Each structure stands twice: as structure tokens, then as C-alpha cells.
Image (spheres, rainbow, N blue to C red):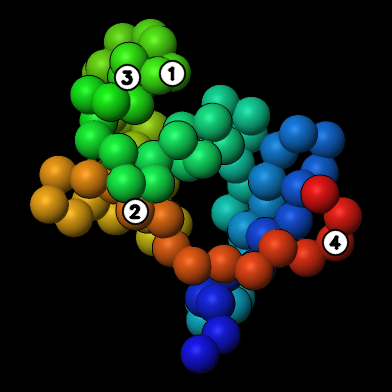
Amino acid sequence: MSAPFLAAELDGEVVLLDVAKARLIHLDSAARRVWEACEGRTTAEMTATLGGPEQHLAESLRSLADAGVLWEEDGRWRRASLRWVGPR
């Protein structure tokens, strides 16, 4: 099964291609930090790691979840599968 997203890094930011929906999702450096920190962690764990107000983190997580690039399962956040393309 192929990954639903292709990912490319550009100047510290990430662009995801949602292959099924033919759309691009841009992660600026702040969104990228949240996205990378989420794998298997709770919101509280990410707040401790990343710092900043938990409300801001929760808003970022909701936005990324609405875009379909991550989801919450049993209180822990998971990233959608992807395949990196190009240099990293």
C-alpha cells in the first residue's frame, strides 16, 4: 500500500501532497515542530517538550487533524503515513 502523502522539505518547512485529494498542505516551521513531536505522544507530553501554552498547541493539533495529516487515538497523537521525496 502506498503512503497517502508525499513529503518534501524546503527551507526548514514541509510541503505535503495529499495524493488522494490532489492538494498541497504547507507546514511552516512551527507547524512542522508540532507535527514531528506528535508521534505517540499526548497533548500534555508535547506541551512539556515544545513549551508554550497548551491552548496554542491544541489549536495547531486540531488544524493538522482537520487537514488529515494526524489523528488522536487513545489520547495519543499519530501521523499519517508518508513518503519523503527529494533531499532532506
**Which residue lies at the image location 22% right of the left edge and 24% below the top edge?**
44
**Which residue lies at the image location 68% right of the left edge and 46% below the top edge?**
14
Tag 3 residue: 47
Query: Is residue 72 in view from this perspective?
Result: yes
Q: Give the vertical position of 16 relative to 4 (above or below).
A: above
Q: Are marks 3 and 4 in contact (CB under 8 Å)?
A: no
x%, y% of residue 10? 81, 43
- Amino acid on which disc 2 is placed: Arg
Gap in angstroms between the C-alphas marked 1 and 3: 5 Å
Q: Are marks 3 and 2 in contact (CB under 8 Å)?
A: no
Gap in angstroms between the C-alphas marked 3 and 4: 31 Å
Question: Residue 50, which numbered label?
Answer: 1
- Amino acid on which disc 3 is placed: Thr
Gap in angstroms between the C-alphas marked 1 and 4: 27 Å
**Which residue lies at the image location 78% right of the left edge and 65% below the top edge?**
85
- Amino acid on which disc 4 is placed: Gly
Q: Which numbered disc flags the more N-terminal residue, 3 or 2? A: 3
x%, y% of residue 25? 58, 54
Tag 4 residue: 86
- Amino acid on which disc 1 is placed: Leu
Q: Quadrant of residue 49?
A: top left
Q: Residues within 10 Å of mark 3 (few under 14, many from 20)?
A: some
Q: Which numbered disc flags the more N-terminal residue, 2 or 4? A: 2
Q: Are marks 1 and 4 in contact (CB under 8 Å)?
A: no
Q: Residues within 10 Å of mark 4 (few under 14, many from 20)?
A: few
Gap in angstroms between the C-alphas marked 3 and 2: 16 Å
Query: Is residue 23 in view from this perspective?
Result: no
